[in-house]
Image (tube, rainbow, N blue to C red):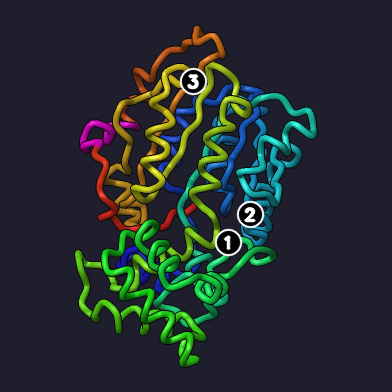
Amino acid sequence: MTEAALRLIEEQGQSHVSVMAREVVAAIAPRRGDVFVDATAGAGGHSEALLEAASEARVIAFDRDPLAVTRCRERLARFGARAQVVHLEFAEIEQWMRERSIPAVAGLVADLGLSSPQLSEARRGMSFRIDGPIDMRMDPTRGETALDIIERSSQDELADIIYLYGGERRSRRVARCLKQALENQQLGSTFELRKAVVRAVGPHRVGGIDPATKTFQALRIAVNRELDQLDALLEALPAIVQPGRVAAIISFHSLEDRKVKQAFLDESRYERLFKKPAVPSSLELDENPRSRSAKLRAARLRSPDGTERSLSLTGSERPMLAAVDDIEDDDPDLDDTDDESEA
């Protein structure tokens, strides 16, 4: 996450602005009576956009965060039985649907970013700008905390986590300082975690980001098994989404985007709606600077025999995705920052 984004969160509180909602609706192209899956309900912004786009459409929204589930239910209450919100990790969606004999749906959206409440609530421990416990769990009802991982991991294991998930090239020095702080009982809060990182890498910003950014990102990804979750969702997409309909996934850093890109390159399973990822429009960036790291990839599911085809986006839908051709579809070596979404 960027320094500017965190400052905006502090100034604006827990307000929500859905990232690329118009582009998601254009890609999924809702029809009357369709049923959709929102794999990351958040505050319900993308679910709401889909429900408003087609009469009698229904959405089943999932989120691992109990607070997000509550907030999403409140936002979607006006749709009545057309909206269902479930407390569940998105890696478990296929099994949940299978156990209830729910057939494949007409589209799926997943926004892989963080929400403002997750960053702005001190008890979550996800921000180095707000003092709190070293937790970082999206679902605080289960699983290890970031402090648990620091405590149980060897120094080498911790360095590997920080390097692989955060791209921190000084990961071994950071891991050593974290272990020293733990041994000296100086690792009891997120502020102390940041201080330990600064002792390892220095106080100077590199590329405009706080020196603790990469370490916090790495620990959060490890705590929530974010990449494992994404792998499971991508593997399950052909069972969740009907052939001929679309899965749209918004990512916020290269580790996620690389996985989505590679999955959608499988032409036996997918027909990409556009070669390069869509990015927020200049208008959206002006209104919601926190969306600047977002990349949207969308693909149509093929039938098992590979014969299913539908029309690509044309006409009035295409301007919504005008930003697609304005960026290079590169594969950066972990030099980006993890920005947050507003679900």
Which span is picked out in magenta?
Answer: 321-329
Residue located beneath label 2 in the image: 64
Residue farthest along the right direction in this orientation = 100
Residue located beneath label 3 in the image: 269
Q: Would you say the magenta stretch is mainly helix, strand or loop?
A: helix
Quadrant housing residue 167: bottom left
- Which one is earlier in the sequence, the residue at label 3 or at label 2? 2
**Quarter in which the N terminus is drawn:** bottom left
Queried whether the magenta region covers residue 112, the answer comes back as no
- Above or below, comparing residue 333 to residue 157 in the picture: above
- Above or below, comparing residue 121 to residue 228 in the picture: below
The type of residue carrying mark 1 is Met
C-alpha gap between disc 3 and disc 2: 27 Å
Queried whether the magenta region covers residue 323, the answer comes back as yes
- Above or below, comparing residue 180 to residue 23 in the picture: below
Callouts 2 and 1 close, C-beta under 8 Å: yes
C-alpha gap between disc 2 and disc 1: 7 Å
Q: What is the secondary structure assignment of the residue under circle 2?
A: loop
Mark 2 Cα within 10 Å, few/some/many (few <14, many 20+)?
Answer: many
Residue farthest along the bottom direction in this orientation = 184
Can residue 203 be seen? yes
The type of residue carrying mark 2 is Arg
* Image coords of residue 229 (percent x, y): 55, 47
Q: What is the secondary structure assignment of the residue under circle 3?
A: loop
Q: Is 142 left, or right, of 237 in this rendering? A: right
Residue located beneath label 1 in the image: 138
